[in-house]
Amino acid sequence: MSEKSEYESKAQETFSAERKEDVFVLVLSTIAVLLVMFGVIGKDTVKSLFF
Amino acid sequence: MAGGGIGVDYSLKGLPRMMPGLIVCFILGWLALQWDTSIHKWSGDFKEAEKIMKAEKEGKPFLPYDEYKTKKSESFAKKQEEYKAKMEAHKAEVAQAAPAEAKKLKGPEKPKKPHVLNQADYEQLTKDKAIPGKLSFGNLMIEFQLTYVAVLLLGGMLIRNTIGLPEVLRAGTVAARPLIKPGIVILGAYYLWSNVLKVGVFGLVMVLVFVMGTAVLISIWGRKAKVDDGLSGLMSAGVGVCGVSAAVAVAPVVNAKPRDFFYAIGTILLFGTLGLFTFPYIGQALNMSQPVFGAWVGTAVLNTAQLVAAASWYGHESLLTANIINIVRVSFIPLIVLWAIYFYVVKPAAAAGGSSEKIDAWQVVKDKFPIFILGFFVMVTLNEFGVFTPDQRDILGKELLKIFFAVGFAGVGLNIAFDDLRKAGGTAFVIGFVAASLKAVLAAVAVIAIGTEFFSVH
């Protein structure tokens, strides 16, 4: 495989990893929102992490 | 690049490799947020201490601590009563007004909980008749904007470029950077569609004029200066639209070589980093309001991670505006790919008398659209339907957001390596740097001329 085509396939692979990263971000955001909406993370939860 | 990573695959297989670096970023993030909490508290205490000192100079003697505290509570209770009465009057006024008029009526402002000094600080103040040093220090740190954002970025950069980053931490610190993105998504709980559309329309104009303008300028200038298509294409996408993400999206179209990629990324990171550390101070020097600054960095700072950091550094209102402009900007990635296809593939093929392969524009849009921003729009819609209470909005858009950002900024700081920045160079660097600087200056003039009202989210 030439350097160029190897690089092209690497770029495609990287972009597909970006898509996977976006999916992960959406899942993580959904979990955060659900935790807040169901009251698992409440008004003082974050404050209680600090002195 | 959205979030600053170059596509992190968060699979279970890769997790053990990422864990050490991620844990370090969490610890650094926590330490920085602890610092932030402390200096904000001390700064608030400093202002309260100043009031007490001023009152004493005007002849009001210091009260014993219990009396001081009771007086504060009584004054707050009185303000709350007044607020309730005003609220009732407001509701009655709204009920009587026509629907269109009712929407314009502004309700009274809820009184803020008073700042009360703790006993030790109050007693030290009354004993020494001077503001305790800790409080003055906190206030000074806030004045210099040395909040968690600055501490993480400057501290991370210092660690990376002095003692270095052990190999075992590298994968995890890179994986921490995109954790800024969930922060961008949940910040959507703070907006109504009317805000998004109002700021978004101006954002769209800014993006069309400055961002697309820069991309087109670099492409044409690059060709005239006989820079390789690969390098000029990457630079045009990266400097114009959204840093690394756009460069990655365009790379296969312009047949970029690995060397081109390093040069382009070096230039993007160098300008983004310079913008991050200088724009907040330039904004202050130019007396930019928070929304105006948000619009400026949303247009002019090259990478999402740096843009979010610079806006957070300036203030929450600034972040709200910058976030919308950035959302508009990253939506343009598919368009920049289409531009690259036209300029680097279709146009040369037509000029040579041949024909290029037919381009499926819709497929390009589908493939290159950064889908995480759909989450932001879902959050805005949920907020529009009143799904979140004010407390939930604050938890999501201020508190959890800070945690995501802190971990992400730790990753960003630890990955600013001077060696990477040195990779920028040559004619393409000059073109990219001049175009980015020009964009920053013209965008600053434009946002100041447009003004706070049009960029304000509330």
Image (cartoon, rainbow, N blue to C red):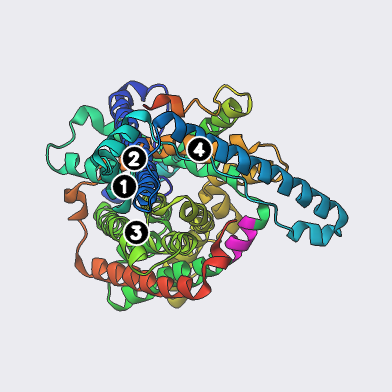
Residue assigned mark 2: B42
The x, y position of residue B55, in whole percent, is 39, 49
Residue assigned mark 4: B72
* Of residues B57 and B421, the one drawn nearer to the viewer in this rendering: B57
Question: Which residues are drawn in magenta?
Answer: B195-201
Residue assigned mark 3: B280
**Label 2 secondary element:** helix
**Quick check: B120 left or right of B87?**
left
Label 3 resides on the chain identified as B
Between marks 3 and 4, how big is the CA–CA gap? 36 Å
**Label 4 secondary element:** helix
* Lower position in the chain sequence, tag 1 or tag 4: 4
* Of residues B291 and B371, the one drawn nearer to the viewer in this rendering: B291
Between marks 1 and 3, how big is the CA–CA gap? 18 Å
Label 4 resides on the chain identified as B
The x, y position of residue A12, in whole percent, is 41, 45
Residue found at x 51% / y 68%: B206
- Give the numbered dot on residue B392: none
Labels 1 & 2 near each other (Cβ < 8 A): yes
- Mark 2 neighbour density, 10 Å: few (under 14) some (14–19) many (20 or more): many
* Lower position in the chain sequence, tag 1 or tag 2: 2
- Mark 1 neighbour density, 10 Å: few (under 14) some (14–19) many (20 or more): many
Between marks 1 and 2, how big is the CA–CA gap? 7 Å
In the picture, residue B271 is in which quadrant? bottom left
Residue found at x 61% / y 49%: B191
Between marks 2 and 3, how big is the CA–CA gap? 22 Å
